[in-house]
Amino acid sequence: MLCARDGEDAAKAWVRSTVELYRRSMENPAHFASQADWKARFEGSVQELTAFTEHGACEVLRDD
């Protein structure tokens, strides 16, 4: 959706910001993202989002 609406550069900027937020959350003992049952989910999301920024996946995500 972000790619279609705002373009790939804006989508990548949003992803980088989100990855940083997730990482900070996982490092913060007071945040639920640091708890074992949630941390793996956040780590998986970080991996997927990072792959998007590395591969410019806007083309791949389209449902044409």
Image (cartoon, helix red, strand yellow):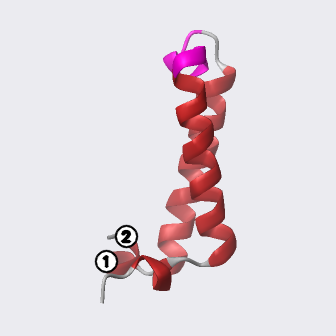
Question: Residue drawn at (34%, 80%), measured in percent from left and top?
Answer: 4
**In the picture, which quadrant includes the N terminus?**
bottom left
> Vertical placement of 60 versus 48: above or below?
below
**Residue 12 lies in the magenta stretch:** no
Q: Please give left or right for residue 60 compared with residue 19 in the image.
A: left
> Vertical placement of 14 versus 55: above or below?
above
- For label 2, the SS is helix
Q: Which mark is residue 44?
A: none
> Vertical placement of 34 versus 64: above or below?
above
Residue 19 or 61: which is nearer the viewer?
61
Q: Which residue bears the numbered disc 2?
A: 2
Residue closest to the far bottom: 64
Question: Residue drawn at (63%, 68%), measured in percent from left and top?
Answer: 53
| Rendered location of residue 42, percent (x, y) | 56, 35
| Mark 2: few/some/many CA within 10 Å (<14, 14-19, 20+) | some
Amino acid type assigned to the residue bearing label 1 in the image: Arg
Instruction: Identify the main secondary structure in magenta.
Output: helix
- For label 1, the SS is helix
| Rendered location of residue 52, percent (x, y) | 59, 67
> Vertical placement of 63 versus 41: above or below?
below
Residue closest to the far top: 30
Q: Please give left or right for residue 64 compared with residue 38 in the image.
A: left
Asked if disc 2 and disc 1 are in contact, CB closer than 8 Å, the reply is yes
Question: Residue drawn at (53%, 34%), measured in percent from left and top?
Answer: 41
| Rendered location of residue 17, percent (x, y) | 57, 51
Q: Which residue bears the numbered disc 1?
A: 5
Range drawn in magenta:
30-37
**Residue 33 lies in the magenta stretch:** yes
Q: CA distance from mark 2 to mark 1?
A: 5 Å
Amino acid type assigned to the residue bearing label 2 in the image: Leu
